[in-house]
Amino acid sequence: MNSKRVSTKAIASIAVLSVVYFIFRMLPTFPMIGVSGGTFTLADVLAPLYGVILGPYMGAATVIIGTFLAIAAGKPIIFLGLDFLPATVNTLMVGFLARKRRIQPISLNIALFTLFLLHPYTAITVPAHIPGLKGEIQLFYPWLHLVALIILISPLSGKAGEWLNKKSTAKLSAAIILLSLMGTMAQHLAGNLLYETVWGMFLGKAPEAFKLLWYTIFWIYPAERAFIIVVTTLIGIPLLRIAGQWLREQLREEVKAP
């Protein structure tokens, strides 16, 4: 009977939060450079929070359903139907970390980072002119992804999961910032891989064109990711405060589960 109640509650949670995700998915934020009609959406701020609240698998299911609801409502398909994948990666990463399971997110992030560096359409460095210096220097394009990966591998990622259980606003804020940073950078890696694979290899955009696109994106993506982290934190603090004791008990039970 208890299992049946839990299952009913899970289905209801997925149904309601999928609709919320769908609504946020219809609200554009930044344009996708190099993708005609493509935009990032406000739903990106929900992906890590769904990982915290629902866990990796229920959270991922909610993101996938919400994405296809948005497509059914007229949201353009950008990545040949795989549009759900970047945010799903984010939710999975954060869902595991919130439950103090680090092997899965570390493995996933390393795999995405490696694939991105090896992809033939990737620009590992971009040229930049520094005032006062002759010529140009090469800047490492995925520098912020490397920062996020270092944090993920470090003890800080484990601490973030612990701080979600604390009543301290400072620790809760730090937890959300760290988790959303790691999640959104993994999401960006997955999105980059889809972008250069779908729009480059499958739809025929020339590798030379991507070099110019990566140069532009290099200067913009840190601000985009910072915006997502800030909004996620502003929404997440009161949301997790409202969840309060229920969330702390759920996290403790899931951490204890085999």
Image (tube, rainbow, N blue to C red):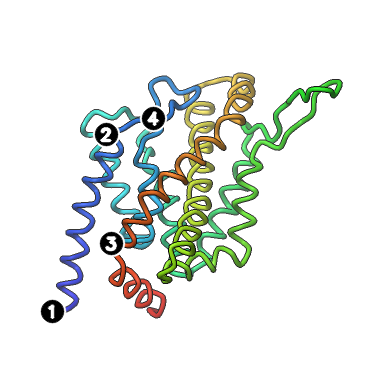
Which residue appears at 61% of the width and 28% of the height?
Answer: 214
Q: Any mark on residue 71, and which? A: 2
Q: CA distance from mark 4 to mark 2?
A: 10 Å
Dot 3 and dot 1 residues touching (CB under 8 Å): no
Q: CA distance from mark 3 to mark 4?
A: 35 Å
Q: Any mark on residue 222, and which? A: none
Q: Quadrant of residue 169?
A: bottom left
**Tag 1: Cα neighbours inside 10 Å, few (<14), some, or many (≥20)?**
few
Question: Residue 143 at what x, y percent from top left?
Answer: 66, 42
**Tag 2: Cα neighbours inside 10 Å, few (<14), some, or many (≥20)?**
some
Picture layout, residue 209 above or below residue 254: above
Q: Regarding mark 1 in the picture, which secondary structure is present there?
A: loop
Dot 4 amino acid type: Ile
Q: Which residue is mark 1?
A: 1
Picture layout, residue 250 above or below residue 69: below
Dot 3 amino acid type: Ile
Q: CA distance from mark 2 to mark 1?
A: 37 Å
- Decide if residue 223 is on the left or right side of residue 16: right
- Sooner in the amino-acid sequence: mark 3 or mark 1: 1
- Sooner in the amino-acid sequence: mark 3 or mark 2: 2
Q: CA distance from mark 3 to mark 2?
A: 31 Å
Q: Nearer the viewer, residue 119 or 31?
A: 31
Dot 3 and dot 4 residues touching (CB under 8 Å): no
Q: Regarding mark 4 in the picture, which secondary structure is present there?
A: loop
